Amino acid sequence: MAHHSIWVRDLVKRYGKLTAVDQLSFTVEGGEIVGLVGQNGAGKTSTLR
Ligand SMILES: Nc1ncnc2c1ncn2[C@@H]1O[C@H](COP(=O)(O)OP(=O)(O)O)[C@@H](O)[C@H]1O
Ligand SMILES: [Mg+2]
């Protein structure tokens, strides 16, 4: 895991009772360019923040 540039495991973001991000896990390698795709309200901005 130490070689990943970004290592996210079981990320959760809640706004009160609303779970906007529900146990999201992913890694990004050095030099990789990654896009986050999803419909409006999917949780992209919450994930990046
Ligand atoms: N500051 C906030 N307070 C309450 N709910 C929020 C807030 N920001 C986002 N949400 C809710 O969280 C969910 C994910 O939103 P968001 O991360 O902005 O998604 P996206 O960027 O993919 O459109 C949506 O249901 C949105 O209404
Ligand atoms: Mg957004």
Image: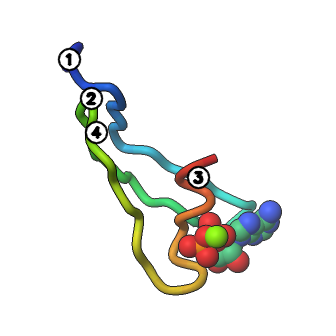
Distance from the alpha carbon under mark 3 to that under mark 1: 25 Å
**Looking at mark 1, is its residue's CB closer than 8 Å to ligand 1?**
no
Distance from the alpha carbon under mark 2 to that under mark 4: 7 Å
Amino acid type shown at disc 2: Gly
Farthest residue to the top: give it. Answer: 2
Give me the residue at 33% from left, 26% from top. Answer: 5
Identify the residue under disc 4: 28
Amino acid type shown at disc 1: His
Q: Which quadrant would the N terminus be assigned to in this image?
A: top left
Horizontal and vertical percent position of residue 19: 57, 65
Identify the residue under disc 1: 3
Identify the residue under disc 2: 30
Label 1, residues with CA under 10 Å away: few <14, some 14-19, many ≥20 = few
Of the numbered discs 4 and 3, the one sitting upstream in the chain is 3
Amino acid type shown at disc 3: Lys
Farthest residue to the right: give it. Answer: 16
